[in-house]
Image (cartoon, coloured by chain):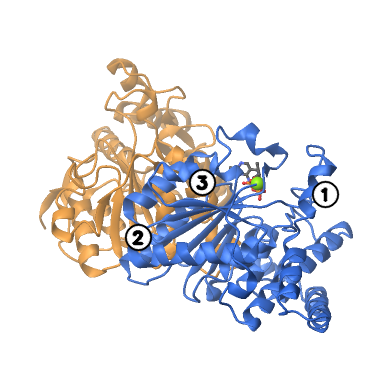
Amino acid sequence: MPMITYREALHHALREEMTRDERVLIFGEDVVAYGGAYGVTSGLAKDYGEKRVFDAPIAEGVIAGAAVGAAMGGLRPVAELMTINFALLAADQIINHAAKVMHMFGGQMSVPLVIRAVGGGGAQLASTHSQSLEPMFAHVPGLKVVTPATPADGKGLLKSAIRDDDPVLFIEHALLYRVRGEVPEGEHLVPLGKAAVKREGKDITLVAYSRMTLVALQAADLLSQEGIEAEVVDLRSLRPLDTETVLASVRKTHRALTVEEAWRTYGIGAEIASRIQEEAFDDLDAPIRRISGVEVPLPYAKNLEQAAIPDAQRVMKAVKEIFARTGG
Amino acid sequence: MGGKTAAKVGQSGLDKKTLLNFLHQMLLIRKFEDKAGELYARGKIAGFLHLYNGEEAVAVGAISALEPHDLVITHYRDHGHAIARGLDAKRLMAELFGKATGVAKGHGGSMHFFDASLGFYGGWAIVGGHLPLAVGLGLASNTLRKNQVILCIFGDGGTNIGYFYESLNVAKLWNVPVVFLCENNLYGMGTALHRASAIREVYRKAAVFDIPAERVDGMDVLAMREATVKAVAHARGGGGPYFLEAMTYRFRGHSMADPILYRDKSEVEEWKQRDPIILFQQRLREEGVLTPQDLEQMERETDELVADAVKFAEESPEPPLSDLHEDIYANP
Ligand SMILES: Cc1ncc(C[n+]2csc(CCOP(=O)(O)OP(=O)(O)O)c2C)c(N)n1
Ligand SMILES: [Mg+2]
């Protein structure tokens, strides 16, 4: 299998889906000449023509709203919003429209659309450009929210998202574009709403998504050297949420730690912890703990920013505390 | 008041049947609205109810200019547009009652009428929020070569929100076949246009995007039709978006909750002198198109349609509780 970057994997997914289905088109900020803020759409306008790949002005409300309208009109748009921070300007369209059409109008019409946006911090872009807002959107029934951690999942999930008949918010992570991984060529689909065990282990379950999956894996490797075998579950989709895979892992390991870059309060970790205790309380040997982004507007200064984003050391420390409390 | 008024009925080039049908639709809308207001007061209808009394000529004239494969997308004051587009009054009333037989299965209510089979793509209740959708629908029409025109209707209040400017800009840029129709009834809830908009001629806001824009007498059904025929031809011919500002007035409150403290009774009375239904009746009589018998029959028919709609709504079942969990996703 070829080793390619996350960026290339996403690019391949777009290319393959555009070739497969003429109704797929791409529009958004700087997708043509600039090639997308992170280079994912580079070259697509040249190959598929500017009728299918075209720029939109810096008008997030209309980009998202036009995607809803285009989907209602029979297209399968992939709209690019540059970053999730700007999705706040499109939140009305995403939440009040995309998520509502199907149910509010009595099931007459669904809106097959994908909105791509970059999330996450770590590039010293300060507080307005570094947010992990996926929990806000994952809160909303009617939406699907996908957060790939690896190149292979990036490709497989994006292809599935484009083929899905519902609105999908596809959140890429700013620090993952250069990460390489093995990616199957051609048809490679990862189902939406299915978590994946990215590393097997018997002692504790680390539940993560997006870049925190890599952090959890790194921590798991370090823990292994100290005799703790952590299982890493990558949620991949935040809505629909695959509780079964998480529960199956916890029933095996009897301990769980969630790892997320987003803020802690009302977060993904809170949701996971709640579901585990509802369904598998008796399987637990220790209270579930959460690691999350520190609850501050993310600062610019490198040391402050680093201190606010979870890393492998923090994960290890939390895992050890869990074991110290309950014994191995 | 300004706004173009159409030539006399006799010169409209429309046959008697069409003209009488316009009157029939306007009457039906008026009676449907009056009945809905009454049923709201009696607790049969809940939520927000925005009635269309006084604005009937806008919907009927404009929508008559569309082909069956064209699309209508509108705001929450949507009853008139739905009736003019031919949605079944029975199923509309059932929607107001929150019944399973409603046009949105009782999920949407007054503000969210929808019938995909008739190209009626909603009632939308976020002011200005459906303008971007119209742009997207226009994009789909162009891309899939559907030759469809999208009639996008909204209020004067909707021209002060960012969506309006973003959508007009992109509509022109992408050359989409959208006819933007602003129903300027001079108020957004209780705020007069001049308190909310730096310019009072709304059509001038579209002109800055080089979109052809004009003001029309929205109390004159034939003027509305004539202007919209032209706008639709422009859009269908590949000319891109077109903008119409219909000067009109709502005779009742913003919604049933509105005590109407913000406008003088004299202003309302003045506008009622220009009741679009009475004006059109007079013109049809003068032209010899409408006989007293015609009118009597039409009154009877529309009364019956409304009575049937109420009966249907009353007798329809509530949505099953299982509906709560269905149709959230197409691919659950
Ligand atoms: C974004 C948004 N803000 C506020 C409201 C509340 N609201 C509903 S209707 C309305 C007035 C709109 O007036 P206009 O667009 O002129 O339409 P009209 O009711 O006069 O037909 C307001 C403020 C809303 N629905 N959406
Ligand atoms: Mg108004």
Earlier in the chain: of badge 3 and badge 2, it is: 3
Instruction: Depth check: give the residue in front, B145 or A182.
Output: B145
Work out whether mark 1 precedes mark 2 in sequence or the reverse, and give the earlier one: 2
Nearest the viewer among A113 and B21 is B21
- Note whether B212 is above or below B265 in the view shown: below
Colour of chain B as rendered:
blue
The reply to whether residue B163 is visible in this rendering is: no
Which secondary structure lies at badge 3? helix
**Which residue position is annotated with label 3?**
B203
The amino acid type found where label 2 is placed reads: Gly
Residue placed most toward the observer, B236 or A99: B236
Q: Are marks 1 and 3 on the same chain?
A: yes
Q: Are callouts 1 and 2 both on one chain? A: yes
Secondary structure at numbered mark 1: helix
The residues tagged by marks 3 and 2 sit, at their Cα atoms, a distance apart of 18 Å
Residue B121 visible in the displayed image: yes
Q: Is mark 2 within 8 Å of ligand 1?
A: no
Q: Residues within 10 Å of mark 1 (few under 14, many from 20)?
A: few
Label 2: chain letter: B
**Above-or-below relation of A323 to B233:** above
Question: In the rendered picture, chain A carries what hue?
Answer: orange
Q: Is residue B80 left or right of residue B116?
A: right
Chain to which the residue tagged by mark 1 belongs: B
Q: Position of residue B13 (x, y in %)?
A: 56, 76
x%, y% of residue B130? 52, 53
User: On what subunit does the disc labeled 3 rest?
Assistant: B
Task: Tell me the tag on residue B239.
Answer: 2
Amino acid type, label 1: Glu
Distance of mark 1 from mark 2, alpha carbons? 40 Å
Q: Quadrant of residue A298?
A: top left
Residue projecting furthest to the right: B42
**Secondary element type, mark 2:** helix
